[in-house]
């Protein structure tokens, strides 16, 4: 009798080997190290000299109509927020009867709101209008830093405003002494400085970490 061929089990034999290659998406500029899997199942790291040039942001919508709708919503909300904060800043700066600690901290809070809006919304509007998702590496780092800076400063300013209300309610006779013009300026400067330091540390730690490898798997038979 003629020898029978072994049944096909889907496993690689000595004659055929299924190869799996893992490569980074270097044409998008990620510049991740290339990883390959040899026939014995061991991964090997390969150096890649390309550098990170940009990132891809997640799209809010896939259809063009929804992207334009998001652009209109972002535009309307951002204009309303900018107008409201500008009115607060103008009223506090021009009204002499509003030169009190509470309104002084409110002016600083409006500045942080303006900073948060101007940091994130314009890029989102640009991507929705022009149907793009790219953001440069330096642009991403700058956006992370400034967003953390304004948000952290806002949190510290809210803490200072809570202290202002506490002194106003619980110690009204000492309000002018504890919250004079110099003390308010020092507390506001400390809030901005703490926000800057917090943003600097978080941004430096974030962009000093190695980025994760997102492999693109290709299979084929030789």
Image: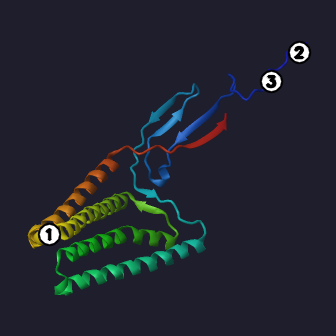
Query: Residue at the spot x=39%, y=67% of the render?
Result: 120
Q: Residue farthest to the right?
A: 1
The CA distance from mark 3 to mark 2 is 15 Å
Q: Residue furthest top?
A: 1
Assign a secondary structure to mark 1. Answer: helix
Q: Nearer the viewer, residue 58 or 135?
A: 58
Q: Position of residue 44 (x, y in %)?
A: 48, 31
Q: Taking 107 as reference, is 211 above or below it?
A: above
Is 16 on the left or on the right of 154, as rendered?
Answer: right
Q: Which residue is mark 1?
A: 184
Q: Where, by quadrant of the figure, is residue 156 drawn?
A: bottom left
**Looking at the picture, how far across and down is residue 170, in whole percent?**
19, 66
Q: Which residue is mark 2?
A: 2
Q: Quadrant of residue 66?
A: bottom right
- Give the number of the disc on residue 208: none
Query: Closer to the observer: label 3 or label 1?
Result: 1
- Category of crowding for the residue at label 2, using alpha-carbon neighbours closer than 10 angstroms: few (below 14), some (14–19), many (at least 20): few
Q: Which residue lies at the image location 42% right of the left edge and 69% below the top edge? A: 123
Q: Tag on residue 7?
A: 3
Q: Is residue 176 above or below residue 52?
A: below
Q: Position of residue 62 (x, y in %)?
A: 59, 65
Q: Nearer the viewer, residue 44 or 167?
A: 167
């Amino acid at each position: 009798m003629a020898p029978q061929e072994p049944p096909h089990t889907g496993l690689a034999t000595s004659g055929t080997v299924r190869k799996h290659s893992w490569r980074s998406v270097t044409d998008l500029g990620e510049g991740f190290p290339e990883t390959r899997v040899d026939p014995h199942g061991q991964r090997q790291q390969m150096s890649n000299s390309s550098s990170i040039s940009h990132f891809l942001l997640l799209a809010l919508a896939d259809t063009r109509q929804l992207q334009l709708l998001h652009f209109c919503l972002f535009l309307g909300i951002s204009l309303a927020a900018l107008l409201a904060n500008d009115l607060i800043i103008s009223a506090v700066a021009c009204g002499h009867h509003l030169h009190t600690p509470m309104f002084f901290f409110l002016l600083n809070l409006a500045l942080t709101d303006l900073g948060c809006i101007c940091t994130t919304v314009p890029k989102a509007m640009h991507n929705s209008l022009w149907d793009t998702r790219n953001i440069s590496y330096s642009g991403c780092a700058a956006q992370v830093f400034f967003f953390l800076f304004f948000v952290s400063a806002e949190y510290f300013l809210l803490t200072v405003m809570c202290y202002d209300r506490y002194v106003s309610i619980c110690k009204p006779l000492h309000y002018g002494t504890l919250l004079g013009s110099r003390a308010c300026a020092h507390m506001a400067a400390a809030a901005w400085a703490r926000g800057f330091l917090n943003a600097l540390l978080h941004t430096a730690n974030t962009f000093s970490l190695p980025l994760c490898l997102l492999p693109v798997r290709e299979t084929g038979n030789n």
